[in-house]
Amino acid sequence: MRQLFPLTLSLSALVVISGCQENPEETEGTEVEFTHIHGLGFTEDGQRAYIPAHDGLRVFENGTWSVVEDDQHDFMGFTMTANGFYSSGHPSMQTDYENPFGLIKSTDGGESIELLALEGEIDFHLMSAGYHSDAIYVINPEPNSSMDELGLHRTLDEGQEWNKGDMTGVSGEVIAIAAHPEEESVIALSTTEGAFLSEDAGDSFEQVLSGSPVPAITFSHSGGELLVAEGTEEETRLKVINTSGESEADIPAPAVKSEDALSYLSQNPQSEDTIMVTTMERDIFYTENGGETWEQLAEEGKSRTTSEGT
């Protein structure tokens, strides 16, 4: 389960991948397991969805799950961009990388990784990068050589320099963060008390949804809307919120178990009606018609194969 970071701790110290993997292990007709789910995202061409699963990457393409033949790293804070993905986490014990990763990236679907910053120092569980801007936001859980304080930080040069956001106006425990796909200074947070939007790189936030926890959040690829999962373990709702804060609309939600809750959601960059969501109990749901119908692709970490392609 994703780690929560209390806002009070942050202030006192002061919310879908690219690069085609050429040879994923073919697993059609066999079960693929998700030991954990630490992120979700689609490639820029919309043909694949990637999920990091504690022991490497899982790929959904043409209705079938496969396992990427990488070193089976434990990717955390996984976030897709048009050029690949950024991540943190822990290296495979079969490699010589320092633990934890700090900040890394891959431009070939996880076949190889590039170390960017803070190797051996920090593991970012909460991280998001602009899909096209590559502005990277993280919630820093402890001091390190580049960050003296806890809380929200941004880098525009892949971790060489970091700037801290004051997070004024945010309440509740931070659950997820989402970077705007184009605008470097626009960032959204979801917390146990709602959803919050900043246009000044995280210095100040305006609440755009209140009244219940928001376990997952992302921007639409147009950047004009926020897609949020709202609710508790008793009820799950999906909403589209205009970033102006003037309107919101409901998306029909999948049949999430009453004891479960959504953990990640991602929109296909080539089709706004194509959405994938995951849950804390490792169920995975997929729609191509804006939620009118949902197909379950995995149940409690065990894959299902759909008869239709993506």
Image: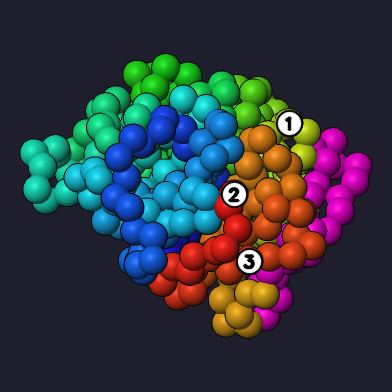
Q: Where is residue 160 in the image (x, y as percent from the top left)?
A: 34, 19
Q: Which colour scheme is used?
A: rainbow
Residue at 57 percent across and 23 percent down: it is: 132
Specify the segment rendered in magenta: 231-254
Residue at 42 percent across and 30 percent down: it is: 19
Residue, disc 2 = 310
Numbered disc 2: secondary structure: loop
Q: How far apart are marks 2 and 1 (CA)?
A: 21 Å
Circles 2 and 1, Cβ within 8 Å, touching? The answer is no
Does residue 199 appear to the left or right of 69 in the view shown? Answer: right
Residue, disc 1 = 222
The answer to which of 169 and 73 lies nearer the viewer is 73
Does residue 206 appear to the left or right of 154 in the view shown? Answer: right
Circles 1 and 3, Cβ within 8 Å, touching? The answer is no
The answer to which of 11 and 251 lies nearer the viewer is 251
Residue that protrudes farthest toward the right in the picture: 246
Residue at 68 percent across and 57 percent down: it is: 287
Q: Looking at the image, tell me whether mark 1 or mark 3 is earlier in sequence order.
A: 1
Q: Looking at the image, tell me whether mark 3 or mark 2 is earlier in sequence order.
A: 3
